[in-house]
């Protein structure tokens, strides 16, 4: 403050005070600046949430892919069983081993089997349509 006694101009005195304040701010370590600390904390929290979201999405995509593969295997197994049942019923009809009174029952059973096949084919088609989406989601989270 000895310098301020020598300066009589109030404008120059204000300029000197301003310069002293700037020097004090520049001498302060950057980690003590609240703006920097706030930005670093926000970055760390954001990064943590992004990493968590990445691993959750990757696990979800892998789980859905596993479910899809399991359903596809089940549908394929059921389809084979139904195909065998249809061929067996057709053979019985062709051989004439089924009596005339049973033909109506066989036809209704055949209609049920065909309906089941169409239901499983529709579900399989839907699953096959979802497969590229799930594969693309998994490929996004593949770590190379």
Image (cartoon, rainbow, N blue to C red):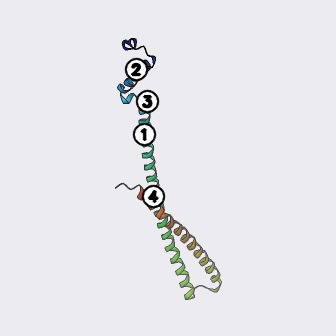
Q: Which residue is labeled 1 in the image?
A: 43
Vertical order, 89 against 3 (above or below): below
Q: Nearer the viewer, mark 4 or mark 1?
A: 1
- What residue did someone put label 3 on? 34
Name the element at disc 4: helix
Q: Secondary structure at mark 1?
A: helix
Q: Nearer the viewer, mark 4 or mark 3?
A: 3
Secondary structure at badge 3 equals helix
Q: Quarter of the image for the C terminus: give it.
A: bottom left
Left or right: 84, with 12 as reference point = right
**Picture coordinates of residue 56, whole percent (x, y):** 45, 49
> Measured from the top left, where is residue 1 in percent x and y?
38, 13
Say which residue label 4 marks. Answer: 137
How far apart are the two marked residues, 2 and 1, measured between alpha carbons? Answer: 37 Å
Q: Is residue 75 above or below residue 49?
A: below
Q: Give the Cα distance between marks 4 and 2.
A: 62 Å
Mark 1 vs 3, N-terminal side: 3
Secondary structure beneath label 2 = helix
Q: Are marks 1 and 3 in contact (CB under 8 Å)?
A: no
What residue do we see at 42% from left, 13% from top?
8
Question: Which of marks 1 and 2 precedes in the sequence?
Answer: 2
């Amino acid at each position: 403050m000895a310098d301020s006694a020598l300066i009589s101009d109030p404008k120059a005195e204000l300029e000197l005070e301003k310069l002293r304040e700037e020097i004090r701010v520049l001498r302060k370590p950057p980690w003590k600046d609240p703006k920097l600390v706030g930005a670093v904390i926000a970055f760390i929290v954001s990064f943590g949430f992004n990493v968590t979201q990445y691993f959750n999405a990757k696990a979800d995509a892998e789980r859905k892919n596993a479910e899809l593969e399991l359903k596809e295997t089940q549908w394929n197994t059921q389809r084979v069983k139904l195909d065998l049942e249809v061929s067996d019923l057709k053979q019985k009809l062709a051989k004439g081993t089924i009596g005339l009174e049973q033909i109506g029952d066989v036809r209704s059973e055949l209609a049920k089997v065909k309906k089941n096949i169409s239901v499983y084919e529709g579900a399989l088609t839907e699953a096959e349509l979802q497969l590229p989406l799930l594969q693309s989601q998994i490929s996004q989270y593949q770590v190379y």
